[in-house]
Image (cartoon, rainbow, N blue to C red):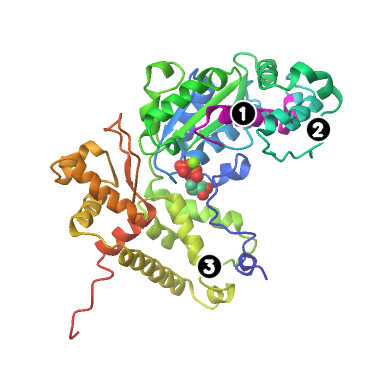
């Protein structure tokens, strides 16, 4: 039997993907009522795109996905006449602006297809299905010899697509068409498509992020009928939201902090309940164990779920079925300690570097290069050397951001928090001889 079914679950309850933009996602989102309300208000009432800043794994993408669904649900319940629908998935930022712009337009076209019925029922003007399909299959969208698999097969140009032909299948033609669809379906003040521009920190420097956002300002951020939510970590969202050229286009960033401890048992129980298919299902990581790992990961939901998932893989279903809940919890604690010790042992660093890790942990896990004095370094370069060393062992992440030294671009990684756990608990201190 399948492992999860053996334990009484339909599938893995510790999946690390962002929550889906549907009723399931709404049910699974716990501890975010305040953020959800404020994001909804900004989507529905604001005239700037929303910016979210917060550490990786804190729940930004999930929050937006659920907010977009709640907005569309409000329309279904006739609580509002504004209709909001989400793009099929969050768009990952890319260095290449024109590729990223293509991704966006492609996603918008798919959203029109996915939501054709909803839009029609709402009395909105929708493009003809075959026109959308034609565009989705158009060679121009498939990029330089790259085939983007289209759910409709590679039929090529047919029907109206051919009619659309000569002038049609250029980037410019496609974009103009999309703009018309958006304007027709979502006249001013009647809602729009909600899209996520995710992981701005992948662009490394705030200068690169700013450049890219300026490049996409007109083709993407000024598209009428679109509500964008931009997400970033390590200070990048905060850094770009304040540039003059994007002023008036982007909102002040909303700071997303970790889900409060008090919600964690409920959060994980909701998940376990949602995924369980039998009353006697047995979870490898129960609520109290999850609270523990949430502490160890410094309140990182994604890392906590990832650890829960890895621990689930230590044995077959029978292994868990043969133990009491308490025994499983003890196994989990032991497993987590062993992982922490293993990682600590693999980091061969100078005492000064270890001290930096510890200081950084007590500082909250993130800092900017300009904080060097707080860590007792004489200059930036000296701190940098030690940061590079920590990075070499995967214990911190940092982006070199020459033009924003104040950006909190240095951050302890998931592995770094595990190693910190090993050290702060003295897990691997050598046995005292003679005891
Ligand atoms: N409020 C929440 N309640 C329950 N699960 C959540 C919540 N927020 C995030 N998650 C889960 O945590 C993980 C990380 O969330 P994600 O949205 O991907 O974070 P981010 O975008 O900030 O990196 C995902 O598995 C997601 O399902
Ligand atoms: Mg994300």
Q: What residue is at 38 percent from the left and 60 percent from the top?
A: 292
Camera-nearest residue between 91 and 36? 91
Residue assigned mark 2: 156
Q: Quadrant of residue 247?
A: top left
Camera-nearest residue between 255 and 36? 255
Please say whether residue 5 is visible from this viewpoint: yes
Q: Which residues are magenta?
A: 91-119
Mark 2 surroundings within 10 Å by alpha-carbon count, few (fewer than 14), some (14 through 19), many (20 or more)? some
Residue assigned mark 3: 313
Farthest residue toward the right? 159
Q: Which mark is residue 102?
A: 1
Residue 196 position, x and y percent, is 54, 32
Residue 296 position, x and y percent, is 35, 57
Left or right of 114 in this view: 235 = left
Q: What residue is at 42 percent from the left and 61 percent from the top?
A: 288
Farthest residue toward the bottom? 434
Residue 66 position, x and y percent, is 56, 38
Among the two numbered marks 2 and 1 on one chain, the one whose residue lies closer to the N terminus:
1
């Amino acid at each position: 039997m399948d492992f999860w079914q053996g334990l009484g679950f339909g599938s893995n309850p510790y999946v690390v993907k962002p929550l889906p933009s549907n009723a399931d996602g709404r049910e699974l989102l716990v501890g975010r009522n305040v953020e959800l309300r404020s994001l909804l208000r900004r989507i529905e009432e604001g005239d700037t795109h929303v910016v979210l800043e917060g550490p990786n794994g804190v729940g930004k993408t999930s929050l937006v996905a659920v907010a977009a669904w709640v907005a569309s649900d409000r329309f279904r319940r006739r609580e509002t006449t504004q209709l909001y629908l989400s793009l099929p998935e969050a768009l990952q930022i890319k260095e290449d602006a024109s590729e990223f712009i293509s991704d966006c337009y492609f996603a918008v076209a798919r959203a029109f297809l996915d939501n054709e019925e909803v839009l029609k029922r709402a009395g909105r003007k929708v493009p003809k299905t075959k026109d959308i399909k034609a565009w989705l299959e158009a060679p121009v969208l498939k990029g330089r010899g790259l085939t983007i698999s289209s759910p409709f097969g590679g039929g090529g140009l047919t029907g109206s697509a051919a009619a659309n032909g000569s002038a049609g299948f250029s980037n410019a033609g496609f974009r103009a068409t999309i703009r018309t669809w958006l304007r027709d379906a979502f006249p001013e003040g009647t809602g729009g498509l909600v899209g996520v521009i995710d992981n701005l920190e992948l662009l490394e420097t705030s200068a690169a992020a700013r450049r890219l956002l300026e490049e996409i300002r007109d083709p993407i951020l000024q598209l009428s009928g679109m509500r964008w939510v931009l997400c970033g970590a390590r200070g990048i969202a905060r850094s770009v939201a304040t540039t003059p050229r994007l002023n008036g286009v982007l909102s002040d960033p909303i700071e997303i902090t970790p889900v409060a401890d008090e919600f964690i048992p409920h959060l994980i129980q909701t998940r376990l309940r949602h995924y369980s298919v039998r009353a006697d299902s047995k979870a490898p990581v129960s609520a109290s164990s999850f609270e523990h790992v949430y502490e160890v990961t410094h309140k990182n939901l994604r890392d906590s779920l990832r650890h829960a998932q890895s621990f689930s893989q230590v044995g077959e279903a029978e292994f868990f079925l043969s133990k009491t809940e308490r025994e499983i919890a003890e196994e989990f604690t032991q497993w987590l300690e062993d992982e922490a010790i293993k990682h600590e042992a693999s980091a061969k660093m100078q005492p000064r570097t270890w001290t930096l890790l510890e200081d950084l942990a007590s500082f909250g896990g993130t800092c900017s290069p300009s904080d060097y004095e707080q860590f007792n370094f004489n200059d930036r370069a000296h701190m940098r050397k030690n940061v590079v060393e920590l990075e070499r062992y995967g214990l911190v992440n940092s982006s070199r951001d020459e033009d924003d030294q104040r950006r909190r671009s240095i951050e302890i990684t998931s592995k770094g928090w595990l190693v910190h756990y090993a050290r702060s608990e003295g897990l691997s201190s050598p046995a005292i001889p003679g005891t």
